[in-house]
Image (cartoon, rainbow, N blue to C red):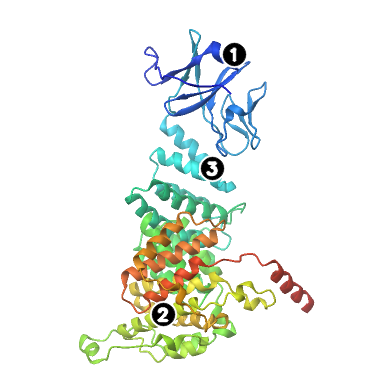
Amino acid sequence: MGSATTEARPISNHPAFTVLHRATSLADLEDRRRMVVRIEGHQIALFRTRDGVRAVANQCPHEGYPLAEGSLSDDCVLTCNWHNWKFDLDSGETLVGGDRVRIYPVEIRDGEVFVDLTEPPACEQIDRSWSALEEAFRDHDYSRLAREIGRLLRNDVSTTEITARAFDWAHDRLEFGMTHAQAAAADWLALHDAEVTSGHEDTAIVTILEAVGHLSWDTLREPAYPYPEGTRTWDADELVDAIEREDEPAAIAIVRGFLTDRHPCEELEHALARAALAHYQDYGHSAIYVYKTGQLVERFGPTPWLLFPLVRSLIYASREDQIPEFRGYAPARKLWSEGPAVPTEDGMKERPEPRIDPAGFRGISVNKALEHCLTVDVTDPRSRLALFDALLDASAWTMLHFDERWMHGTDQPISKNAAWLDFTHTLTFANAVHRLATRYPDLWPAGLLQMACFVGRLRPFLDTELDASRWRVDDADGFLRDTRSHLFDHGSAEYIISAHWVKVWAAVDEEVRSRDDAPWAMPVLAATRRFFEASHKRKHALRTVRQALRFVKSE
């Protein structure tokens, strides 16, 4: 294959808005029929076809293989022989494959071949990239998503606009509402800001790619699930009631009224948090999603494509306090006062500093954990914080003592299936409770009791004799920094795994950095280290078949 490096020679009498460069002589190209030239950083493949000279970027957009080595048909279709992608050399459009290739206008003057390197107008490039990004989004073409994000950023389109469009494309294709994709996006975007500040372009784009890619994956081949029409006057209590009744039309109409009348976002967040914590539900997702949506609203403002999926997820949330294991939750909730009565300064001085032993919550049942909570004066802010500390410490201890044999087992009933993602919610839920209840103190009773439910529900899956010292973290800052670096090249093909990694890291980083002297700091870091170092068995073929056969036999 012939190759030449040419000298760039703009043509002085050509219109100023074009950039023509000499590529080679026509005679030389006639002899070779195809050749590669390099002009100002561009590697260009030239082809002598029966319809004239064609110039195309030499890299196949699929995996970068040289198109100059491809096969060219008489009708000017170029095939990349590595993976059979085919391109129309007249337009650059792909005929087989997933991305167009750039072509360059060619002009022949005095026996010389000139190539026009003029960039298309920015508006044309942006419009083309938006269309291509949406196409890649619908197909979950990960590499193409990365290219189109890079092209948009090169044309000064903001990451805010890129992710906003992805949220919009996804929001009405979520049958049951919000997923981990939106929740993790809040953390990916926070990491993005830090990477931009540090001048790390590549890792900053990784965060956007992961956020957009996960939204794409969760809506892949999904049809639209339209939201109900209608608008109702904003009323926080009515919204909470509509969600309690699982009335999506009413709930969406009330939120639409909120958006129409532009009420303070705190009113909506408080109402949604009340609905999320009205039950011990959905394995903690509801409260986590409310907290993460609040972070997204701070970035994008309140929009239907953020709020409607969240409301739908609250409507469909499983209410686990209705099952036998957690029926002690509602009575315990009633025994605590509905709202915190903050003591006077004098009253607080008279009270001894509350101390709650986290060991009392380790390895106990749900009901025992709830009973233990009821010994605490929830109206005292210091007691609430001491109880939170004890429950978070116990949550970390629980996570540190997960018996992975339950994850690898093949003979247990479905109710005994357990894996790492069941344990991580003890940390991310605690983070959501802490942040939401600090903002809205009436949420503390429900949040603390539900943390106790988490500790109790995981008791059957523990190895209390497990030596957890191997996961000790002595340098908190170094550990959080190294773990953060792992997120940018995590290597997992499953978004659900990387979503939990980034959400756990963000929750732990936020909690530890706000109170690095807290009694739970070291256990929480050790639990996080164990999670990041763990293997994840994500497919259970034999267990699934055995459980299915037992079910079929019992029918």
> Is 245 placed left or right of 270 in the picture?
right
Give how far across and how far down residue 488 sits, in percent: 45, 54
Report helix, strand or loop for mark 2. Answer: helix
Which residue is under mark 1?
31
Neighbourhood count class around disc 2 (C-alpha, 10 Å): few under 14, some 14–19, many 20 upward:
many
Q: Could you tell me which residue is drawn at 73 percent across and 73 percent down? A: 546
Residue 508, image quadrant: bottom left
**Which numbered tag is attached to residue 393?**
2
Q: Amino acid at mark 2?
A: Asp
Which residue is painted at 71% across and 74% down in the image?
547
> Around disc 1, counting alpha carbons within 10 Å, would you say few (fewer than 14), some (14 to 19), or many (20 or more)?
few
- How far is the residue under mark 3 from the one under mark 1? 36 Å
| Nearest to the observer: residue 283 or residue 424 | 424
In the figure, is residue 219 to the left or right of 482?
A: right
Which numbered disc, 3 or 1, marks the residue that appears first in the sequence? Answer: 1
Viewport quadrant of the N terminus: top right
**Which x, y percent locates residue 97?**
62, 38
